[in-house]
Amino acid sequence: MKLQLLKVSKDQISSFSARQDTMPNINSRWHYHPEIELVYFKKGKGTQFVGDSISPFLPGDVVLVGANLPHYWQFDTSSDNNPDGPEADVSVIHFNQLFLGDTFLKLPENKVLVNVFEKSKRGISLSKSSGRKIGPLIEKIVSAEGPRKIISLLEVLLAIGECKESNLMASLGFRNDFQEEEKDRINAIYNYSISNFKKNISLKEISTVANISPNSFCKFFKSRSKKTYSEFVREIRIGHACKLLIDNKLAIKEICYESGFNNFSSFHKYFKMIKGKTPMGYQKSFVKDSF
């Protein structure tokens, strides 16, 4: 999953890009770009990677990803009764923070927009209820023309700024300004960890992947991510467990082992530590929020 700079295309008559995607996994690779990205999942589900955050995405979700924040969406390929593969209906907006000019953002009335852009550096995920309200507004950006296109985008950004139920995604310590020579090493670590989190990854094993000594690896990873490698792997496992809990096809104890944990007590402990609630509490709160 090599980190790639994605060049966002836009036509000659628009100041930003707005499109509807009906094919999943169009950009299912670890990438970044200088444009801020606004996404509304009307249809489709899977796992989202934003910075060092790993979590499920579902129909109705709205996410705002800041400039140069690495991300990608991996659609669930196990869609029920769909021989053509996973279903998708996604509105995607790319825009430069200064597309209306630096002077515009300096206006005192636009402090709320400046705050939204600042928070987007870690990625913003809206609550289900907010997503239901803002999602249709994002669809209007895609279909609108002329000044109404700009006005629609500003309305959405204002709604996000006024939303009281949102979560920042990447951790406070996550760095998105890696040196060029570090990017391949970071991507090798991420790629291997995401592919092998269900098994026990030894320090020697992951150090070999990173092509540095075990002692150097520990210092390198902690300095770049502000967390230990063990903590990072646990977060990947818990993110996978969340997806399985939402799917509600396995018993919670089965989810424990399917997510790479060796015993239920550790799973329960770390799930509550990372998500702030028990696995069952998480599942119940999701079901409640879905109605």
Image: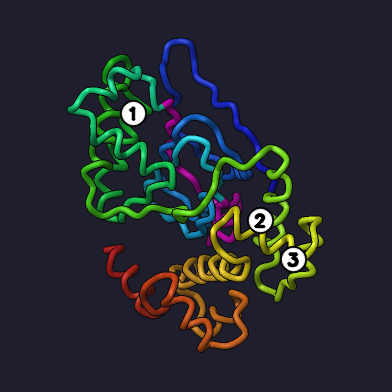
Q: What residue is at 56 percent from the left and 69 percent from the top?
A: 231
Q: Which residues are magenta?
A: 74-96
Query: Where, by quadrant of the figure, is residue 196 drawn?
Result: bottom right
Q: Residue at 55% across / 80% down in the picture?
A: 256
The three-letter code of the residue at mark 3 reads: Asn
Mark with earlier residue (2, 3): 2
Q: Nearer the viewer, residue 83 or 253?
A: 253
| Residue matched to label 1 | 141
Measure the C-alpha gap from mark 1 to mark 3.
50 Å
Residue 75 or 23: which is nearer the viewer?
75
Q: Secondary structure at mark 3?
A: helix
Helix, strand or loop at disc 1? helix
Disc number placed over residue 215 in the picture, else none: 3
Count up the numbered dots.
Answer: 3
The mark found on residue 190 in the picture is: 2
Please state, as top left, top right, bottom left or bottom right, where the C terminus lies in the image.
Answer: bottom left
Q: Is residue 83 above or below residue 91?
A: below
Viewer-side label of 1, 3: 3
Labels 2 and 1: the sequence-earlier one: 1
Q: Earlier in the sequence, mark 1 or mark 3?
A: 1
Identify whether 28 is placed above or below 269. Answer: above
Neighbours of disc 2 within 10 Å: few (<14), some (14-19), many (20+): many
The answer to whether residue 276 is magenta is: no
Task: State the CA–CA distance, disc 2 to disc 3.
Answer: 18 Å
Number of the front mark, 2 or 3: 3
Q: Secondary structure at mark 2?
A: helix
Name the side, left or right, on which 152 lies relative to 28. left
What residue type is disc 2 on?
A: Tyr
